[in-house]
Amino acid sequence: MNLYFKKSVFLFSLVCTISCNAPIGNENTTVSIKTTLGDIKIKLYDGTPLHRDNFIRLINSGFYEGISFHRIIKNFMIQAGDPATKTGSSKILPDSVKTYTIPAEFNDQYFHKKGAFAAARQANDVNPQMRSSGTQFYIVQGVKLSDDELNLAEQRINSNMKQSRFTSLMKETSDSVRLAAKTITDAQIQEIASVKMFQYLTTYKDYKISEEQRNVYKTSGGTPRLDATYTVFGEVIEGLDIIDKIAEVPTDSNDKPLNDIKIIKIKIIRN
């Protein structure tokens, strides 16, 4: 059985398991993540039901048992959820988010404060809709920021949002031309997309970090540059010290821990 076929079978089985598994959570779902370095308790947000329910189905399927935190960047975040980390093979760099995806669920109330629980995703150039990975998540450690740093974060957020929109318009224009069986140059596609982008910018309102959120970023810390472009769907309510502990472990040049930090069990403890 070749590698491509194995991956296809795995993903098909995963999607079937998720879609057939019962029941999603109700309000105020809380889950416990038992890791080899300690326990973390997460509250899932009801305002992001697609992500909440998908995560609960994965928990019910046992998907996360034995998966490792494969990407750790101190003062930024810890990331897990790649099925490749279950193999234990040192030949695989488990940093793919190319499983199934979920539509983004951005909510201004949910932001990247310390302890934010969010969905990983592919970059804007290949994922302009900012769809989330179906399985990979990260937990923010972050740092405390000044007002000047928060202003720069706002600029970065707005730049990312505009770039993502323009990439989407380019793709939409290209797809439309292709379906119409027309011949058109790349320069013409860009010109059409640019006109549409100008129209979009006439109504675009810059994203602003609220004063309340600024106070949290200045006193508790976080990673504000990811706001409004990555879906936050929960937060740590117990175990921030475990996040700090995991973030301290030695890593290689690919941000992979030198020693595996595994998820032993994730279970729903209240819903």
Image (cartoon, rainbow, N blue to C red):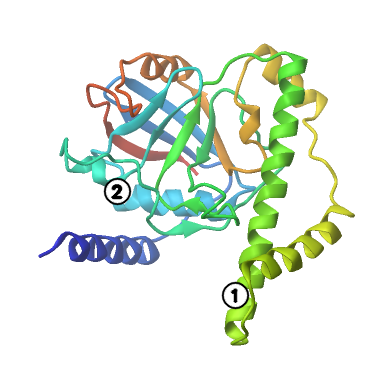
For residue 50, above or below residue 253: below
Pick the residue in front: 113 or 44: 113
Residue drawn at (71%, 19%) of the image: 149
Q: Which residue is mark 1?
A: 175
Is residue 96 rendered to the left or right of residue 106?
left
Element class at badge 2: loop
Q: Which residue is mark 2?
A: 63
Q: Which circle, 2 or 1, is nearer the viewer?
A: 1
Crowdedness near tag 2: few (<14), some (14–19) or many (≥20) residues, C-alpha within 10 Å: many
Element class at badge 1: helix
Q: Position of residue 122 (x, y in %)?
A: 48, 48
Residue drawn at (35%, 63%) of the image: 15
Q: Amino acid at mark 1?
A: Asp
Q: Amino acid at mark 2?
A: Phe
Residue drawn at (78%, 24%) of the image: 212
Is residue 50 rendered to the left or right of residue 169?
left
Query: Within the image, what quadrant is residue 181 found in?
Result: bottom right
For residue 170, above or below residue 209: below
Is residue 143 rendered to the left or right of residue 91?
right
Q: Residue furthest bottom?
A: 181
Residue 109: tell me if it is visible.
no
Q: Where residue 210 is drawn, which disc sits there?
A: none
Pick the residue in front: 207 or 261: 207
